[in-house]
Amino acid sequence: MADVLEDKRAATRFRILSEIADRQPAVSQGEIADAVGVTSQAVSEYIRGLVDDELVEKEGRSRYSVTKEGVDWLLQSATDVRRFADHVTDDILGNVGEDAAIAITDVEEGSAVTLSLRGGLLHARPSDEGPATGIATTDAEAGEEVGVTEFEGIIDLEPGRVAVYQIPPVRSGGSRAVDSDALAAACERGDVLAATGVEAVVALRAANVEPDTTFAAGEVAAEGAERGLDVVIVATADSVGRVTDALRDAGVAYEVANVS
């Protein structure tokens, strides 16, 4: 769970730092107290702690600004909160109607099923035990889709990892500057392989690797990671920014490396 949701003090600290960022440099502790729902004295104590931790800088009487470290902490905390909210929305199952899952073994209509995510897709097997369960609304043989309703519980899901490998643009050598063996090895680390840019596609072909998609690489990677898949993106250096922007917008962690 996100740190700012684990206890009241962390949540209050997050809210007060957010209010300072919104109001800086002229900060009224009374207005923050009203907005957050604590006393002015409590706000003062929290601000002193934020200053001590170098997340906030005091510039004078009632004048404060959020430091670079404070901005980074806010962004990371906000990302964690958004990821947890997405987890609640997508993975914590309530009575949300009917959905489809792939039957792992034969399933009979009306039977209880245990739910899991495999390869980014919802799967079901007959059982009334597990972190997430439901009731089958159709018959299905193994491998067929089965309707499921009356969802309960939480699907155990660890977010996937995203690795972005940069390929030089053609003016800097393009695919010819890439170590094909290293690129092929890097691609083996992902469940999904996305490519963007002509140089990236040519470099992959030279490494005898075919991407799963050559469009919307950042969006595909974000969706895959949120479904527990590890994703490798091979991108021409000129297009890496668009890829990482999409990943940041989705709150997905990633790393960038070179294979040239």
Image (cartoon, helix red, strand yellow):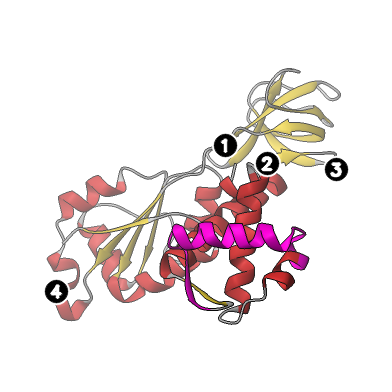
Mark 1 and mark 2: span between their CA atoms? 8 Å
The N terminus sits in image quarter: top right
* Labels 1 and 2 touching (C-beta < 8 A): yes
List x then y, in percent, for residue 235: 33, 66
Q: Earlier in the sequence, mark 4 or mark 2?
A: 2
In the displayed structure, 245 sits above or below 229; it is: below
Mark 4 and mark 2: span between their CA atoms? 45 Å
User: Mark 2, residues whose alpha carbon is within 10 Å: few (<14), some, or many (≥20)?
Assistant: some
Mark 2 residue element: helix
* Labels 1 and 4 touching (C-beta < 8 A): no
> Which residue in the structure is indicated by mark 1?
157
Mark 3 residue element: loop
Mark 1 residue element: loop
User: Which of the numbered marks, if any, corresponds to residue 91?
Assistant: 2
Instruction: Name the residue: 32% across, 43% down.
Output: 189
The answer to whether residue 224 is magenta is no
Type of amino acid under label 4: Gly
List x then y, in percent, for residue 32: 70, 69
Q: Earlier in the sequence, mark 2 or mark 3?
A: 2
Type of amino acid under label 2: Asp
Instruction: Name the residue: 51% across, 50% down.
Output: 224
Mark nearest the camera among 4 and 2 is 2
Of residues 25 and 41, the one nearer the viewer is: 41
Of residues 239 and 50, the one nearer the viewer is: 50
Question: Picture quarter containing residue 99?
Answer: top right
List x then y, in percent, for residue 125: 68, 23
List x then y, in percent, for residue 128: 76, 18
> Which residue in the structure is indicated by mark 4?
173
> Which residue in the structure is indicated by mark 3?
97
